[in-house]
Amino acid sequence: MKIFNTLSKRKEEFVPLEPGKVRMYVCGPTVYNYIHIGNARPMIVFDTVRRYFEYKGYEVNYVSNFTDVDDKIIKKAMEEGVDSEVISERYIEECKKDMAGMNVRPATTHPKATQEIPGMLEMIRTLIDKGHAYVAKDGTVYFRVSSFQEYGKLSHKNLDEMMSGFREIKVTGEENKENPSDFVLWKPKKEGEPSWSSPWCEGRPGWHIECSVMSKRYLGEQIDIHAGGEDLIFPHHENEIAQSEAANGKTFANYWMHNAFLNIDNRKMSKSLGNFFTVREISEKYDLQVLRFFMLSAHYRSPLNFSAELMEAAKNGLERILTAVDRLKDAARTAEDREMNARELAAADEVKTLVTKYEAAMDDDFNTADAIAALFELVKLSNSTLTGTDAKEFVAYMTETVEKLCDVLGIITGRRMESLEDAVEALIVERQAARKAKNFARADEIRSQLSDMGIILEDTREGVKWKRA
Ligand code: AMP
Ligand code: ZN
């Protein structure tokens, strides 16, 4: 498997720290509102990465945080006159509902920053002791960027250039810094803000320290993959590397993965620009499976422009796959207990070739766009091979393959089918009851309702059977 590593700017063969295991950390959202579909992109992309690793037989320890202490959360809490925790807990719950709708599986652990303060105090203490951090007059603790020689290695920035660039910028309130590029690890509280006591001042943590600490606590000092949107490369991930590697004296993450932006009219979708749709808004118009399929229709490192046309195309594409799965279920009902014939054997061989094609795409830095193309070829093959009198073995093999490849992409193949089946079964039961009660008018009405749904009933000796017209 090859992964594009932001650190080396090239695709590298994936070699795990521990054979058969993957430790990955994905920076999660700041919870002060509903998430927008830009935030959904890393969730969907890295959930798919996780699923593919599992498909390949890896055991994945997947950690993704919720940033629940932040200026924006505090501001919203003040506006509503409630504690910050009320706001963050509310939007964590809402975010989890959106994730479920998009079939993004819960992480192995979803740590929250406010629950990890002791670990942060400990890492800050270590950084001070090692000379990588200092306490300013007002009690703010800063990371001393000049003490970490490799600063800039992820974002490919030159430290000297950066230092001279920073020298030009004077930010009010930051005159206590030794150097303008230094960043905050701990800061004094302001009136009305949540705070914790520390050896330096009553205050709260800076944003970057959270992820270094949570990653260490739940995954260890060294991890395989650290991921997030590309806006996090600098300064967030650069700072995380500085903190973790300076404190632990070890390489922090071996592979750094970053998704490109979800744009709208070719500009980054963001809360601050106001050009966003929340996942919740999209869910009113589309099944969130469509949103997921739309996101995966592009490679994760390519910018993706959100549009109604592309969502419609995604909906139709998904429909094509789900319809093929429906047909396979129908075929299973009428399949024959016999050996595969020559046609089926040839098709089964082609299935193998398409699986290889799909895997090759995914092995090449998770190219979901090409993987979906292989999946489309597979459903086309399925549709053109099925006759209604197929060998059970062939139908089972095709069904299992389609479902497995769909599952890696997080496409739920059972859902629509189940809801249709449930509706049909319920109507059949009602029709039987009507007939028993000699209410033939109602029984006929149900038969014609089912016929409108494209369902044909057959009264057989073993009971009522149904099939699609
Ligand atoms: P935030 O809550 O802004 O920290 O964002 C949470 C995650 O969403 C981060 O990984 C961001 O990089 C990512 N993100 C935010 N906006 C976009 C966007 N328009 N496209 C892709 N990813 C984004
Ligand atoms: Zn982070």
Image: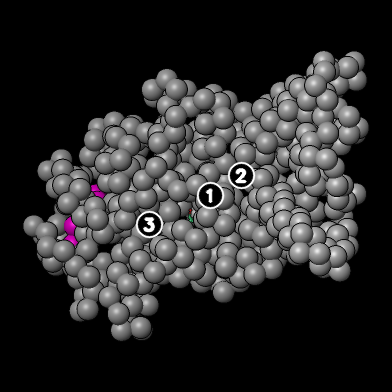
Task: Tell me whether the residue at label 2 lies in contact with that at label 1, contact meaning CB atoms closer than 8 angstroms.
Answer: yes
Question: Which residue, given by chain and number where applicable, does mark 3 sit on?
Answer: 66
Q: Give how far apart the Cα atoms at labels 1 and 3 are.
A: 15 Å
Q: Specify the segment rendered in magenta.
A: 140-145
Q: Is residue 141 magenta?
A: yes
Q: Count the marks: how many?
A: 3
Disc on res. 410: 2
* Amino acid tagged 2: Gly
Q: CA distance from mark 2 to mark 1?
A: 7 Å
| Residue under numbered circle 1 | 104
Which element type, helix, strand or loop, lies under badge 2?
Answer: loop
Q: Circle 3 — which element?
A: loop
Residue at 40% across / 62% down in the picture? 92
Residue 296 seen anywhere in this rendered image of the structure: no
Distance CA(mark 2)–CA(mark 3): 22 Å
* Residue 461 image position (x, y, % from top left): 83, 40
* Mark positioned earlier in the residue sequence (1 or 3): 3
Q: Nearer the viewer, mark 2 or mark 3?
A: 2
